[in-house]
Amino acid sequence: MSKKNKRQIKKEMAKMCEFGCFICKKYYGVTNTHDLNIHHLRTGVGMGQRNHDQFICLCVKHHLWGLEAIHGIGKKAWEEKFESEISLLEWYKEQETETKING
Ligand SMILES: [Zn+2]
Ligand SMILES: [Zn+2]
């Protein structure tokens, strides 16, 4: 995978935030662009390290606080409740491609 530069990553993040929280969108059919956080995926990297190329966009409720938050209930429980971070990212990319095709 090619390394992205900071500018590209920022652009991608901004776009993702326009899309809204992934969980709100996929599971509740709502475009939630309030109190959004970027959640970095840690798959494939060592402990405590961040993979800067892979991140998803989550609202505070699904990211930090509460019974549906990945850092609130823990990644394992969260992924059981919804799905894996990676599969959400893949889902987002699919949506992106469709938008591009449809204009
Ligand atoms: Zn949400
Ligand atoms: Zn996070």
Image: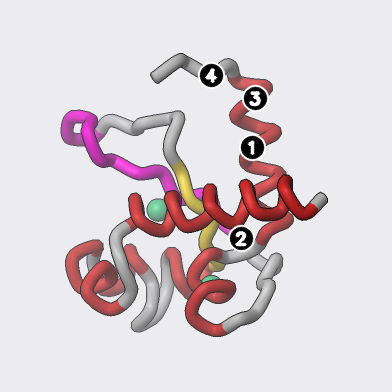
Helix or strand or loop: what does disc 4 sit on? loop
**Labels 3 & 4 near each other (Cβ < 8 A):** yes
**Labels 2 & 1 near each other (Cβ < 8 A):** no
- Looking at the rendered structure, the kind of residue marked 2 is Leu
Residue at 42% in and 58% down: 88
Tell me which segment is drawn in magenta: 36-48
Helix or strand or loop: what does disc 2 sit on? strand
Magenta stretch secondary structure, dominant: loop
Q: Residues within 10 Å of mark 2 (few under 14, many from 20)?
A: some
Spot occupied by residue 16 in the image (x, y as percentages of width and height):
64, 50
Query: Marks 3 and 2, Cα distance to the nearest angstrom?
Result: 19 Å
Query: Marks 2 and 1, Cα distance to the nearest angstrom?
Result: 14 Å
Mark whose residue sits in front, 2 or 4: 4
Q: Residues within 10 Å of mark 1 (few under 14, many from 20)?
A: some
Which label sits on residue 66? none
Query: Marks 2 and 4, Cα distance to the nearest angstrom?
Result: 22 Å
Query: Marks 3 and 1, Cα distance to the nearest angstrom?
Result: 6 Å
First in sequence: mark 2 or mark 1?
A: 1
Q: Residues within 10 Å of mark 3 (few under 14, many from 20)?
A: few
- Location of mark 4 (residue): 4
The answer to whether 6 is drawn above or below residue 23 in the figure is: above
- Location of mark 3 (residue): 8
Q: Is residue 45 part of the magenta span, yes or no?
A: yes
* Along the line of sight, the residue nearer the viewer: 36 or 27: 27
* Along the line of sight, the residue nearer the viewer: 93 or 41: 93
- Location of mark 1 (residue): 12
**Labels 4 & 1 near each other (Cβ < 8 A):** yes
**Labels 3 & 2 near each other (Cβ < 8 A):** no
First in sequence: mark 3 or mark 2?
A: 3
